[in-house]
Image (cartoon, rainbow, N blue to C red):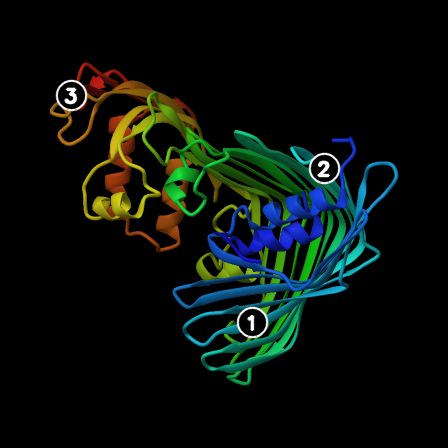
Amino acid sequence: MTRRHPLRAGACITALMIAPAAHADVTAQQVWAAWQDSMTQYASGAEVTTGAVDEQGNTVTVTDFALTSDSDGDTFKMTIPQVVFTGADDGTVAITLSESVPVEIGSPNGTAIALSIAQTGTAITASGSPEDMTYDVAADQYVIAIDSLTTPEGPVTGDMRVTLNTVSGNSNTRTGDTNASTYDVTVGTADILVDIATPEDESLMLSGKVDGIASTGSSSAPADLDFSDPAAIFGGEYTAQGSYTSGPSAYIINVDGTSTMNGTSTTGPGTMTYAIGPEGLGYEVSVTDVAAELTSSEMPFPFSLSAGSYDVALQAPVAPTDAPAPLRLLLGLSDVTVNDEIWAMFDPASALSHDPATIRLDVSGAAKLDVAVMDPAQAAALAGQPGFPGEIESLTLNDLTIDAVGLNVSGTGEFTFDNTDTTTFPGMPRPEGSATFDIVGANALIDKLIEMGLIPAEQAMMPRMMLGMFAKPTGEDALQSVIEVKDGQVLANGQRIR
């Protein structure tokens, strides 16, 4: 038999680990039908085929279940040699897969990948009803290994694998006019190994381990949603949200070729969250206790870096909205240190403060968008067009922090924008609001840069004059600048500058 649907390779592989189970009676035949729908619901232009399908009572045995796709020469094929659905007296169905599932991926440039997904100690149980089905899974181990990799330059040989240990979780799928799903997965540890030789006779070894992985999420979409249309997913009626957390991780890397490199890195616990909906999409990543050590034949000395944390967040509308949608940009690095050899490159006399540095920018706001940026035609039309393709309603500077080399800058502010007036400030909507900046240690830093010979004394006059014009003293080498935009005027500490 044959079906065609939109393909997402990652979703199909994930479905092997946790296929779509609510508690009511369900038959093997019903789970087999739901399995097919689950495996292909995100597959664009894909084809599902099977060999024999043998039904004996409340047992269905399927051989050679294959999912294939060919899109402009990019090919994907996954084959499950055997799947057995066995009904139990309690109304649940046990699902047994072949111990190894091969996957083949190819591209027009000649790249070909053959990988396998192997499992040990796996138990998958389906329960519920065809319209509300839950799958519970537990496995001692999943191993995703690249068995062969050929590039346009030639074959890559060696060992490439990811091993997931002590896997457990569940997923639930509810179907109807709206299809909704949830998932919850935990992994005790993940082991990563790449030990390869390239066609250029270079070798790469990367070994890593991540502890305590957990991931949860949910999604909802109309039953007739076209998953092959990015504009229908992002900014449309599709909604999804989820989170990923992990414990400490550690990695070792070694590169040997025209140059050599050796290094280690570690991190503490980390989190990632994401959301997709009518107001746009957003994600946030936070990782703590970052450390890296690196030596290379290209560097005369080792490189060492540590950071208390780093944070990245982005949120924005991607399709037209009736009301202003949230905006956010967050970039943060805290308590960053580097080794003395790095400092010696530009501060051999240790004139500057080498205390841990922190930099953080956190901006939020709201905006309307005029176009669907996920629509290829509309996105192409934006190329070369000046300005923002919509209306910016407000921007808030939640936090600006620079604490490095003896300089401390902090700032907050809030502005709204009148989009009916683009002449007061030519080419942009008229802003209204204020921002406050506190600066400590600026003059001392300028003096040290002059002593180091990094800037001539006469060139230091300009930044000192700018500080005097736009800031007022608040203490010893401490300044404050309040920038206001009001009725088309720009004021610095009450003095009009525009």
Which sits in the foreground, 358 or 160?
A: 160
Pinpoint residue 281: horizontal percent, then vertical percent. Answer: 45, 36
Mark 1: give few (<14), some (14-19) or many (20+) Cα within 10 Å: some
Farthest residue to the right: give it: 89
Which sits in the foreground, 280 or 20?
A: 20
Mark 1 or mark 2: which comes first in sequence? 1
Name the quadrant containing residue 245.
top right
**Amino acid type, label 2:** Thr
* Residue identifier under label 3: 421
**Amino acid type, label 3:** Asp
**Amino acid type, label 1:** Ile
Viewed as shown, does residue 441 lie left or right of 17?
Answer: left
Mark 3 or mark 2: which comes first in sequence? 2
Residue 108 to residue 184: above or below: below
Residue 160 to residue 288: above or below: below
Q: Which mark is residue 113?
A: 1
Mark 2: give few (<14), some (14-19) or many (20+) Cα within 10 Å: many
Mark 3: give few (<14), some (14-19) or many (20+) Cα within 10 Å: some
Residue 333 to residue 122: above or below: above
Label 1 close to label 2 by CB (< 8 Å): no
* Residue identifier under label 2: 134
Which sits in the foreground, 496 or 39?
A: 39
Distance of label 1 from label 2 (alpha carbons): 33 Å
Pinpoint residue 250: horizontal percent, then vertical percent. Answer: 70, 57
Residue, x 80% and y 47% (percent of image)? 58
